[in-house]
Image (cartoon, rainbow, N blue to C red):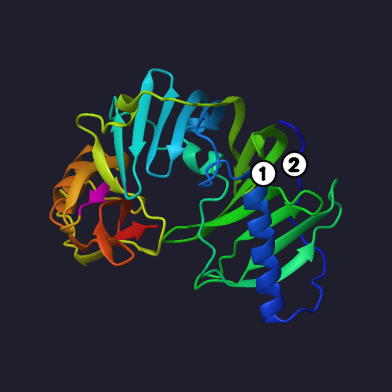
Amino acid sequence: MSSFPTLLCATVVALSKAEIQTLAQADIDRARRFSDIRSPDAPAFRLKATFSFVGKGSKTLQGTYTEIWVSNSQWRRETVVDDLRRVEVGTRNRIWRLDNSNDFPNTAPPLPHLMNIFPMATADVVFESVADAPDAKVPEECATTKAGARQEKSRFCFDKKTGALLAEVLPDILPATVRDHFCFYGVFRKFGAFWFPREMACLENQKPDVEAKVEEINAESSPDPSLFSPPTGADELGNCSGRSVPPHATSSPEPDFPLGVVSPESSITLSLIVDVQGKPQNVKVRESGGKGLDESALKTLRKWRFTPATCDGEPMPEEIEVQINSSLHGSLID
């Protein structure tokens, strides 16, 4: 990968809150105009990329990613790791996802997020500072958000000359800690009226997480309509571009673990889809705690009930993770 910019910022120039918010939003809007190949006036495209990431046991795995984009109401993505395959088909408010195996690695990187460098809505984001980045190879300006309830902050750094988004740090909020997720973008090349990065790299708490390289991006004038039909047997998920609220557990009985199998280190991570009725669907073990623990946790989690996720007030299905530890208490993982 080529070298990427720093995310450190210099001393902040004294600005009013309104001036900071205006400057930060102007930087984001300019970056969107420069690189957002999924904007309403952009042409349909087919994108192919290769990527590598660190899997279980610190093993480096490689894969390919293909995306066909017509609009935010018609798109298809395919991620392949060895002989494992995930297909996603999307409309304005739904995503249908189908894996060819339950073994699709849960450590696989979220390639759609990495390739869509403007996934966040910033209308309700409050920025606390805008400052130049010191010692950067190109002049950069970084906008930092106000700290949240867990003191988490996001930061976005832009090329001051072109306006391109060069780097971002987004907090990964877990039950016991907050981890910083860094992503860097480089080698911008022209596609239509836009300049899109051809190389990306992400770090999790300063450790390499994923690297990706866009091999091809071409205009797609008349894609086959059948590509956008929901795959048979696919899971249905919500797709929200407005104000989203995650699910909330309303009934969460504790698992009845078998005697003698619980240790102080026992911990299980499970994934599930909370449907629009607030019921768990497609419950799976992501991080095993052992056969006896897993079976009890699966049985119990299917009995949980939730207030479903919403998008602009309307219920939608959403996938979440739940971690159950040796204290026998389950906690949601954002």
> Relative to residue 18, is residue 314 depicted above or below?
above
The residue type indicated by label 1 comes to Phe
Where does the image place residue 224, in percent across and percent down from the top left? 36, 23
Which quadrant would residue 334 be assigned to in this image?
Answer: bottom left
The picture places residue 153, in percent across and down from the top left corner, at 59, 65
Give coordinates of residue 263: x percent, y percent.
Answer: 30, 50
Q: CA distance from mark 2 to mark 1?
A: 6 Å
Q: Which residues are magenta?
A: 267-275
Local SS, label 2: loop
Q: Residue at x 19, y 31 (%)?
A: 233
At 20% from the left edge and 29% from the top edge, which residue is drawn?
A: 232
**Residue 288 visible in the snapshot:** no
Q: Residue at coordinates 61% horizontally, 33% vertically from top-left?
A: 211
Classified by dominant secondary structure, the portion drawn in magenta counts as strand
In the displayed structure, does residue 206 sit left or right of residue 324? right
For the view shown, which residue lies furthest in the bottom direction?
16
Q: Are marks 2 and 1 in contact (CB under 8 Å)?
A: yes
Q: What residue would you read off at disc 2?
A: 4
- Does the image show residue 255? yes
Q: Characterize the local packing of mark 1: few (<14), some (14-19) or many (20 or more) Cα atoms within 10 angstroms.
A: many
Q: Secondary structure at mark 1?
A: strand
What x and y, as percent, mark residue 189?
71, 33
Q: Compared with residue 179, is residue 307 higher up or lower down, i.e. above or below?
A: below
State the mark number for residue 184: 1
The answer to whether residue 320 is magenta is no
